[in-house]
Amino acid sequence: MLQALFMTLQVLLAVIGVYQFGFALFGLYKKKREKSFDPQKSFAILVAAHNEEEVIGALMENLKHLKYPRELYDVFVICDNCTDKTADIVREHGWNACVRVNPNLRGKGYAIEWMLEELWKLDREYDGIVMLDADNLAHRDFLIGMNDDLCKGAKVIQGYIDTKNPNDSWITAAYGISYWYINRLWQLSRHNLNMANFLGGTGMCFDNKLLKEMGWGATSLVEDLEFTMRCVERGVYPKFNYYAKIYDEKPLTFKASSVQRLRWMQGHFTVARKYFFPLLWKSIRDFSIVKFDMALYAVNVYIVLLTLMLTVVLYGDIALFGGPHLLTMYDYLPLWVAAGAIVAQVAVFFVAMILEKVKSWKVYAYMLLFPIYLLSWFPITFYAFFTQNNKQWSHTKHTRVVRIDEMQSEQS
């Protein structure tokens, strides 16, 4: 009985792995950039900030130099329970500092919900709502890309999230490698197939009317994933704009990274419980591969947990009982299949870096430590499973001040 269950779960994980690898192949190519529309859409750029005096100035300066008519966008910084000079710095740059004080409802989701209500009280109505993080930098063409997609009828758009400090440490390099893979072989592949993309927490744009109709309503620890699920449930499929880039600061240390990823996994468990079965049912009812794909993404956190459990059972059997007493699916397959599966799991990251034309020798050198980063997801996910009811927002402190020209010069 145990052997049958063990084998069944292994086969299930293998099928999911092949499914995801198959989708990744559609990200090997990218379509030529289409001709841009003339600037016509107006934007409110919302920036959620909690004690970000170290980095907010660089973003405020950056947003003054976007290649988009200045009269068509405004910047609103949500100074959420700040106790530093964030609001003063925003005002010094001529943008709108919107001060929110609510010690009971903390977190980015609540801050965004509050800001949208304030925004909708204004006399001016914007076409699109863009959301950035305080540590971001935006490519000069970012709003051009958002304007293009809104003009084409898109309602929810995710830009390309790049890393502004991949060379700082092996951890920031690991984030960079992960995001190059995600952008190219996950997001772009689904974009090429006209499927739904998932939101990444920053570099997002929303049709204002859709937001008013739906309300934000995403106040979990992973508000971006939660809103993605709400959209797909109602048949609104987020789009990915490969050419609209923002640059995000990544944590410098393993400890800071672990805290951030623990929050992500805790929130992911919450979203999985709430949306997996409804989306799975709707995918069957509607014969929708898009909804099925998103349901699978919602439950991915349990897939990671299941992989860990099967690995522990297998090696526990060997260590404690002199096994192996349990046969794996690879015992029935040629050796090259197992070897090929392992090589493919590593190769996809190299392929993504090559496709994205990563030039930094330091990042390639840090690839030697990348497996540690990947394996660390297992204990983090395991701990998150038992602490998933923790709803306390953990703030990631940002200190790396990089200007857009400095970053582009370093990467070239």
Image (spheres, helix red, strand yellow):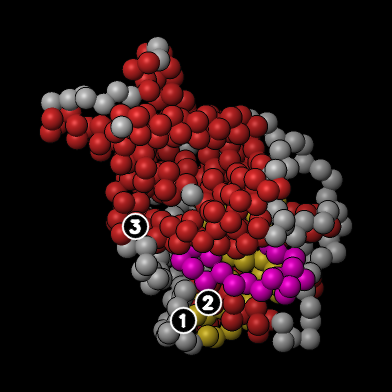
Badge 1 marks a residue whose secondary structure is loop
Left or right: where does residue 368 sit relative to residue 63?
left
Three-letter amino acid code at the position of disc 2: Tyr
Neighbor class of circle 3 (other Cα within 10 Å; few <14, some 14-19, many 20+) is many
Q: Does the segment drawn in magenta span residue 208?
A: yes
The foreground one among 302 and 253 is 302
Residue 127 sits in which quadrant? bottom right
Left or right: where does residue 222 sit relative to residue 144?
left
The CA distance from mark 1 to mark 2 is 6 Å
Badge 3 marks a residue whose secondary structure is helix
Picture disc at residue 110: 2
Three-letter amino acid code at the position of disc 3: Ala
Give the labeled residue for mark 1.
Answer: 105
Horizontal and vertical percent position of residue 187: 61, 44
Give the labeled residue for mark 3.
Answer: 384
* Magenta residue span: 198-223
Question: In this orientation, does residue 273 appear?
Answer: yes
Residue 394 sits in which quadrant? bottom left
| First of labels 2, 3 by sequence position | 2
The residue lying at 49 percent from left, 80 percent from top is 80
Badge 2 marks a residue whose secondary structure is helix
